[in-house]
Amino acid sequence: MGTGKEKEFRLGAISDTHGLVRPEAVKALQGVSHILHAGDIGKPEVLESLRAIAPVTAVRGNVDRGPWAYALPVTEVVELGGMSLYILHNIQELDLDPAAAGFRAVIYGHSHMPAIEERNGVLFLNPGSAGPRRFRLPVSLALLRVKEGNLLPQLITLG
């Protein structure tokens, strides 16, 4: 995990796995320092598979049920590389001003639509869905390069 002393490291952002960890996702996440899962995990084995790659911070999505899922928070704050990142599943449930709260990024999922947007100096990142294909939406995840206090996001299409 980044401590702020490293000049550069990489994070993985994934969402909406719905019980499926694709081999292409495992390959794309190799070498990351930390994985952020923005909910709709599907089953605990998904987190176990991801933890074999790097430490994982995950939030509960609307399809996550049962004791394993209820143990997960609905939102989470992660401090990496001297930056605060806010993770939640559904962006419609964001109940704070991330810029005013000092967050550098908001990582979310739910819509299955990958997106990278900057608002008021805050990166809003939806890595898309890395699980079963939904409609004609791409299957994707995101990598975040953290370099000298900057977040450089990249969407990765899987399959």
Image (cartoon, rainbow, N blue to C red):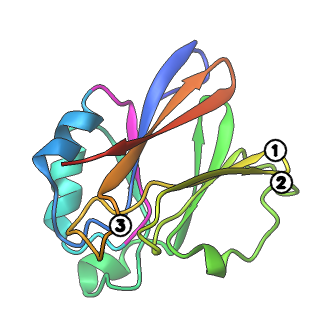
At x 29%, y 87%, the residue is: 65
What's the distance in space between the residues labelled 3 and 2, CA to CA? 30 Å
- The residue at 22%/45% (across/down) is 25
Numbered tag placed on residue 121 in the rendering: 1
* Secondary structure at numbered mark 3: loop
Give the mark nearer the N terminus: 3 vs 2: 2
- Give amino acid for label 1: Gly
Residue 107 left/right relative to 50: right
The residue that mark 3 highlights is: 137
The residue mark sitting in front, 3 or 2, is 3
**Would you call the spot at circle 1 few (<14 residues within 10 Å), some (14-19), or many (20 or more)?**
few
Q: Which residues are magenta?
A: 31-39
Residue at numbered disc 2: 99
Residue 52 in sight? no
The residues bearing labels 3 and 1 have C-alpha atoms spaced at a distance of: 28 Å
Which residue in the rendered view is the most extreme toward the top? 7
The disc at residue 135 is none
The image position of residue 1, as x and y in percent, is: 44, 31
Whether residue 116 sits left or right of residue 128 in the image: it is right
Q: Viewer-nearest of labels 3 and 1?
A: 3
Residue 71 or residue 103, whichever sits in front: 103
Q: Which label's residue is closer to the chain start, 3 or 1? A: 1
* Three-letter amino acid code at the position of disc 3: Leu
In what element is the residue under mark 2?
loop
Residue 20's quadrant in the figure?
Answer: bottom left
The image position of residue 18, as x and y in percent, is 24, 73
Q: Residue at x 46, y 65 (%)?
A: 113
Instruction: Name the residue type under label 2.
Output: Ala
